[in-house]
Amino acid sequence: MLKNLHLLLVTLVFISFVGRVLLAEFKPAIFQQKWLKIAPHVIDTLLLMTGIALVFQGNWLTADYGWIVGKLMLLIIYIGLGMAAMRHRGPKRWLAATGAVICLLYIAKIAISKNFFGF
Protein backbone atom coordinates (compact mmCIF):
# COMPACT_ATOMS: atom_id res chain seq x y z
CA MET A 1 0.00 0.00 0.00
CA LEU A 2 2.72 2.49 1.00
CA LYS A 3 4.85 1.56 -1.99
CA ASN A 4 1.89 2.04 -4.34
CA LEU A 5 1.16 5.47 -2.83
CA HIS A 6 4.84 6.39 -3.25
CA LEU A 7 4.81 5.28 -6.90
CA LEU A 8 1.63 7.28 -7.53
CA LEU A 9 3.27 10.35 -6.01
CA VAL A 10 6.40 9.82 -8.15
CA THR A 11 4.18 9.80 -11.23
CA LEU A 12 2.36 12.93 -10.06
CA VAL A 13 5.66 14.73 -9.42
CA PHE A 14 6.88 13.91 -12.93
CA ILE A 15 3.61 14.92 -14.61
CA SER A 16 3.20 18.08 -12.55
CA PHE A 17 6.78 19.20 -13.18
CA VAL A 18 6.57 18.73 -16.93
CA GLY A 19 3.13 20.35 -16.97
CA ARG A 20 4.31 23.36 -14.97
CA VAL A 21 7.32 23.88 -17.24
CA LEU A 22 5.07 23.79 -20.28
CA LEU A 23 2.58 26.18 -18.69
CA ALA A 24 5.33 28.56 -17.58
CA GLU A 25 6.70 28.68 -21.12
CA PHE A 26 3.54 28.68 -23.22
CA LYS A 27 0.70 29.86 -20.92
CA PRO A 28 2.31 32.02 -18.20
CA ALA A 29 -1.04 33.57 -17.20
CA ILE A 30 -2.46 30.15 -16.29
CA PHE A 31 0.78 29.25 -14.50
CA GLN A 32 0.23 32.18 -12.10
CA GLN A 33 -2.80 30.51 -10.47
CA LYS A 34 -2.18 29.99 -6.78
CA TRP A 35 -3.12 26.30 -6.68
CA LEU A 36 -0.54 25.55 -9.38
CA LYS A 37 2.13 26.98 -7.11
CA ILE A 38 0.97 25.20 -3.93
CA ALA A 39 0.01 21.73 -5.22
CA PRO A 40 3.52 20.68 -6.28
CA HIS A 41 4.85 21.43 -2.79
CA VAL A 42 2.13 19.28 -1.24
CA ILE A 43 2.86 16.42 -3.65
CA ASP A 44 6.63 16.73 -3.10
CA THR A 45 6.20 16.71 0.69
CA LEU A 46 3.98 13.63 0.58
CA LEU A 47 6.48 11.93 -1.73
CA LEU A 48 9.35 12.65 0.65
CA MET A 49 7.32 11.44 3.64
CA THR A 50 6.38 8.18 1.95
CA GLY A 51 9.98 7.70 0.83
CA ILE A 52 11.26 8.13 4.38
CA ALA A 53 8.57 5.75 5.66
CA LEU A 54 9.60 3.16 3.05
CA VAL A 55 13.24 3.43 4.11
CA PHE A 56 12.31 2.62 7.69
CA GLN A 57 9.70 0.02 6.74
CA GLY A 58 12.21 -1.78 4.51
CA ASN A 59 14.91 -1.47 7.18
CA TRP A 60 17.24 -0.23 4.44
CA LEU A 61 19.48 1.83 6.72
CA THR A 62 20.95 -1.32 8.30
CA ALA A 63 22.49 -2.51 5.02
CA ASP A 64 24.45 -0.73 2.31
CA TYR A 65 22.60 2.54 1.97
CA GLY A 66 24.76 4.43 -0.52
CA TRP A 67 21.93 4.30 -3.04
CA ILE A 68 19.66 6.20 -0.64
CA VAL A 69 22.29 8.91 -0.24
CA GLY A 70 22.62 9.01 -4.03
CA LYS A 71 18.88 9.50 -4.41
CA LEU A 72 18.94 12.34 -1.87
CA MET A 73 21.83 14.05 -3.68
CA LEU A 74 19.98 13.79 -6.99
CA LEU A 75 16.82 15.08 -5.30
CA ILE A 76 18.68 18.20 -4.21
CA ILE A 77 20.03 18.67 -7.74
CA TYR A 78 16.49 18.13 -9.13
CA ILE A 79 15.13 20.83 -6.81
CA GLY A 80 17.81 23.30 -7.91
CA LEU A 81 17.28 22.57 -11.60
CA GLY A 82 13.51 22.71 -11.15
CA MET A 83 13.76 26.14 -9.53
CA ALA A 84 15.96 27.31 -12.41
CA ALA A 85 13.48 25.92 -14.94
CA MET A 86 10.64 27.87 -13.33
CA ARG A 87 12.58 31.14 -13.06
CA HIS A 88 14.31 31.33 -16.44
CA ARG A 89 12.96 31.55 -19.96
CA GLY A 90 13.95 30.15 -23.33
CA PRO A 91 16.98 27.88 -23.70
CA LYS A 92 17.98 28.19 -20.02
CA ARG A 93 14.55 26.95 -18.97
CA TRP A 94 14.71 23.98 -21.34
CA LEU A 95 18.23 23.05 -20.30
CA ALA A 96 17.33 23.17 -16.60
CA ALA A 97 14.07 21.29 -17.18
CA THR A 98 15.85 18.59 -19.17
CA GLY A 99 18.44 18.22 -16.41
CA ALA A 100 15.67 17.97 -13.81
CA VAL A 101 13.84 15.27 -15.78
CA ILE A 102 17.11 13.33 -16.19
CA CYS A 103 17.57 13.53 -12.40
CA LEU A 104 14.06 12.17 -11.84
CA LEU A 105 14.63 9.32 -14.27
CA TYR A 106 17.97 8.45 -12.69
CA ILE A 107 16.39 8.51 -9.23
CA ALA A 108 13.83 5.99 -10.53
CA LYS A 109 16.62 3.82 -11.97
CA ILE A 110 18.43 3.85 -8.62
CA ALA A 111 15.19 2.94 -6.83
CA ILE A 112 14.75 -0.10 -9.04
CA SER A 113 18.36 -1.32 -8.93
CA LYS A 114 19.16 -0.23 -5.32
CA ASN A 115 22.55 0.83 -6.69
CA PHE A 116 23.70 4.39 -7.33
CA PHE A 117 25.40 3.42 -10.56
CA GLY A 118 22.33 1.48 -11.68
CA PHE A 119 24.02 -1.87 -12.29
Image (cartoon, helix red, strand yellow):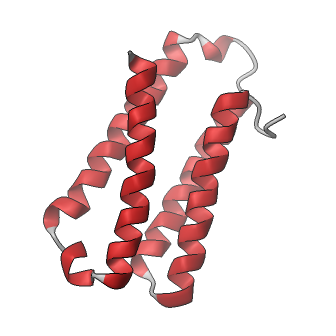
Vertical side of 54 occupied by 24: above or below: below
- Is residue 71 visible in this depiction of the protein? yes
Q: From the viewer's perspective, is 60 left or right of 37?
A: right
Q: Position of residue 92 (x, y in %)?
A: 55, 84
Q: Position of residue 109 (x, y in %)?
A: 68, 39
Q: From the viewer's perspective, is 69 left or right of 86?
A: right
Residue furthest to the left in view is 34
Q: Quadrant of residue 31?
A: bottom left
Quarter holding the N terminus is top left
Quarter holding the C terminus is top right
Q: Quadrant of residue 110?
A: top right
Vertical side of 44 occupied by 8: above or below: above
| Residue at 39%, 73% in the rendered image | 22
Count up the numbered dots.
0
- Is residue 68 visible in this depiction of the protein? no
Q: Position of residue 113 (x, y in %)?
A: 73, 29
Vertical side of 11 occupied by 90: above or below: below
| Residue at 32%, 74% in the rendered image | 23
| Residue at 67%, 11% in the rendered image | 62
The front one of 56 and 103 is 103
The front one of 26 and 83 is 26
Residue furthest to the bottom in view is 90
| Residue at 47%, 29% in the rendered image | 51
Q: Position of residue 78 (x, y in %)?
A: 55, 57
